[in-house]
């Protein structure tokens, strides 16, 4: 008896330890790659595995180091980073194949055999995206923030993958409630894991001004002090903002800074009386109404203000875009709004950047380099497309992460819709608006407004798991997507989301594994 039970225990222990992972084509990758071919073997990452990068390429070396840093804590392995042209078998190799044009800016080719892992891309960004896929091919416990037991087996096969849309973003409203540098870095890490490439920061609104502008110091000295409901305000110094930009850049993510205008400007109007038509400073505001404030579009000082703000922001922002809002300017007359938008568009261009504005900016004469962000009105999206102005698609009814899942959700709003996890996934940017097709669309964004969200774990609860689906909409061809198949992959991410300590909504519509 004791001998047979010994064997039972032994078999259970032993089989746990060596149980092979699911085949590569059953690995529940999110976003789903363009093509995956499985072969029936595994590669084992051991203490002898090294990471090879091309000699003399500092950028790829940095990406290799990023992979080392990801693996170090959970696996206890610290793969040696080696630069050579000859890669012996048994290792991980990152290589650049600039001739492989199909891979574009962000595509990659991943080949995993029992002998080693080859990750190739035309551009460094592609290597970075490919590493996110490799992470998901490793066991979920590789996402933990403390040491885990091996073995570290990766199923073999090949993946060729590239994104459908060039712009795949998330927006965080740091104006209604302020979120500090560490919170934003965590959000950057989380969106990077799902291959997003833009973080739009909503840096000013009625309730607060969140970025230091050296030529207008009272914006932060005074205008940063408030937040919704009397919560603590805050702002990023230029050094902190630059640190965020660098952190994002190291993850091949651009920061898109937004200074909302001419409406949503109470914090600025409270900081500088001269920006008001009546010359009187407004009180700081902590409510959640919209549409009551406006810069004085008829005063020259307003354009000096915009020019200074855009100049300082442009100097700090390597990405191509400056977002100047333009939404819900309900107390700005249309005859004032249009010349205002035309003029701030010129200012953005004069500082070498492209304007992004919420869809109302299509009332103005947009340049072909400007981008309209579709959030509410289909006719604005259509009007942009008709004029060959590119669109970022973020319809409130589908993509707004501050919308409640259902009527029982603790936080959030529901003015646009209740958005369950299936609803956030089941739509196609290229068929949302008649006359707006894939060619008109720069990409997709998932905005998160924070009137009701004061803590980063509340932000996470609203963003996750919907953000994974929105990331997939931006990356994976629409023809390859279906909710019934996706929900299984999402369910299989349960232990990954847990390992990352993400506070996520466990929707009953998802078969959590
Ligand atoms: C509308 S969306 C707004 C924001 C609010 C949001 C709340 C947009 C361009 N403007 O000012 O925060 O609704 O869901």
Image (cartoon, grey):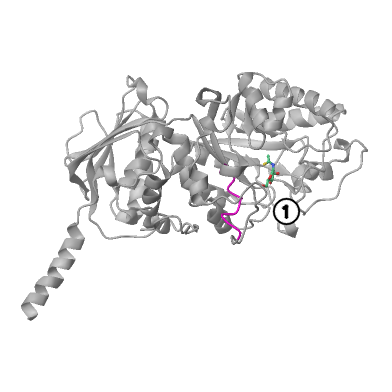
Q: Main secondary structure of the magenta part?
A: loop
Label 1 element class = loop
Q: Is mark 1 within 8 Å of ligand 1?
A: no
Q: Residue at x 22, y 55 (%)?
A: 151
Q: Is residue 171 visible?
A: no
- Residue 285: % across, % down: 80, 51
* Magenta segment boundaries in residue numbering: 399-407
Q: Is residue 117 above or below residue 351?
A: below
The part of the image, by quadrant, that contains residue 432 is top right
Q: Is residue 391 above or below residue 18?
A: above
The part of the image, by quadrant, that contains residue 411 is bottom right
Q: Residue at x 50, y 50 (%)?
A: 421
In the displayed structure image, the side of residue 385 where residue 307 appears, left or right? right
Front one among 20 and 394? 394
**Mark 1 Cα-neighbour bin, 10 Å: few <14, some 14–19, many ≥20:** many
Q: Residue at x 17, y 67 (%)?
A: 12
- Residue 174: % across, % down: 65, 47
In the displayed structure image, the side of residue 106 where residue 277 appears, left or right? right
- Specify the quadrant that holds the C terminus: bottom left
Q: Which residue is mark 1?
A: 227
In the image, residue 400 lies in the stretch drawn in magenta:
yes
Q: Is residue 359 above or below residue 411?
A: above
In the displayed structure image, the side of residue 236 where residue 208 appears, left or right? right
- Residue 413: % across, % down: 65, 53
Front one among 273 and 510? 510
In the displayed structure image, the side of residue 491 where residue 175 appears, left or right? right
In the image, residue 293 lies in the stretch drawn in magenta:
no
């Amino acid at each position: 008896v004791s001998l047979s039970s010994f064997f039972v225990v032994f078999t259970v222990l032993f089989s746990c330890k060596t149980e092979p992972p699911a085949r590569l084509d059953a690995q529940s990758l999110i976003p789903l790659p363009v093509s995956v071919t499985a072969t029936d073997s595994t590669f084992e990452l051991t203490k002898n595995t090294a990471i090879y990068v091309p000699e003399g390429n500092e950028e790829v070396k940095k990406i290799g180091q990023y992979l080392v840093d990801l693996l170090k804590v959970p696996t206890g392995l610290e793969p040696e980073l080696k630069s050579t042209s000859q890669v012996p078998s048994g290792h991980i190799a990152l290589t650049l194949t600039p001739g492989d044009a199909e891979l574009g800016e962000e595509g990659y080719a991943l080949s995993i055999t029992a002998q080693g892992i080859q990750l190739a891309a035309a551009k460094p960004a592609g290597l970075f995206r490919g590493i996110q896929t490799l992470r998901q091919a490793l066991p979920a416990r590789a996402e933990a923030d403390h040491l885990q037991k091996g073995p570290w087996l990766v199923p073999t096969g090949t993946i060729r993958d590239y994104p459908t849309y060039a712009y795949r973003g998330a927006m965080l409203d740091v104006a209604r409630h302020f979120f500090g540098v560490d919170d934003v870095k965590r959000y950057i890490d989380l969106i990077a894991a799902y291959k997003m490439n833009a973080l739009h920061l909503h840096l000013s609104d009625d309730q607060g001004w969140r970025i230091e502008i050296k030529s207008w110091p009272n914006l932060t000295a005074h205008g940063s002090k408030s937040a919704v409901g009397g919560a603590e305000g805050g702002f990023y110094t230029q050094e902190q903002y630059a640190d965020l930009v660098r952190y994002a850049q190291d993850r091949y993510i651009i920061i898109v800074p937004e200074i909302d205008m001419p409406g949503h400007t109470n914090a600025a109007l409270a900081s500088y009386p001269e920006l008001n038509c009546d010359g009187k400073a407004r009180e700081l505001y902590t409510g959640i109404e919209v549409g009551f404030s406006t810069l004085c579009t008829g005063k020259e000082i307003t354009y000096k203000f915009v020019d200074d703000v855009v100049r300082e922001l442009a100097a700090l922002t390597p990405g191509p875009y400056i977002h100047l809002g333009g939404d819900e300017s309900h107390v700005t007359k249309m005859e004032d709004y249009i010349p205002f938008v035309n003029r701030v568009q010129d200012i953005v261009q004069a500082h070498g950047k492209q304007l992004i504005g919420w869809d109302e900016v299509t009332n103005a004469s947009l340049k072909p380099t400007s981008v309209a962000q579709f959030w509410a009105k289909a006719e604005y999206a259509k009007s942009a497309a008709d004029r060959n102005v590119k669109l970022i698609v973020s319809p409130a009814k589908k993509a707004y992460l501050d919308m409640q899942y259902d009527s029982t959700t603790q936080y959030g709003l529901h003015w646009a819709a209740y958005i369950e996890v299936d609803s956030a996934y089941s739509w196609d940017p290229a068929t949302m608006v008649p006359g707006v097709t894939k060619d008109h669309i720069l990409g997709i964004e998932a905005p998160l407004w924070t009137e009701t969200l004061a803590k980063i774990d509340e932000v996470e609860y609203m963003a996750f798991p919907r953000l994974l689906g929105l990331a997939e909409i931006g990356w994976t061809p629409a023809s390859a997507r279906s909710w019934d198949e996706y929900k299984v992959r999402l369910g299989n991410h349960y232990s990954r989301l847990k390992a990352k300590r993400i506070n996520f909504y466990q929707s009953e519509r998802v078969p959590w594994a």
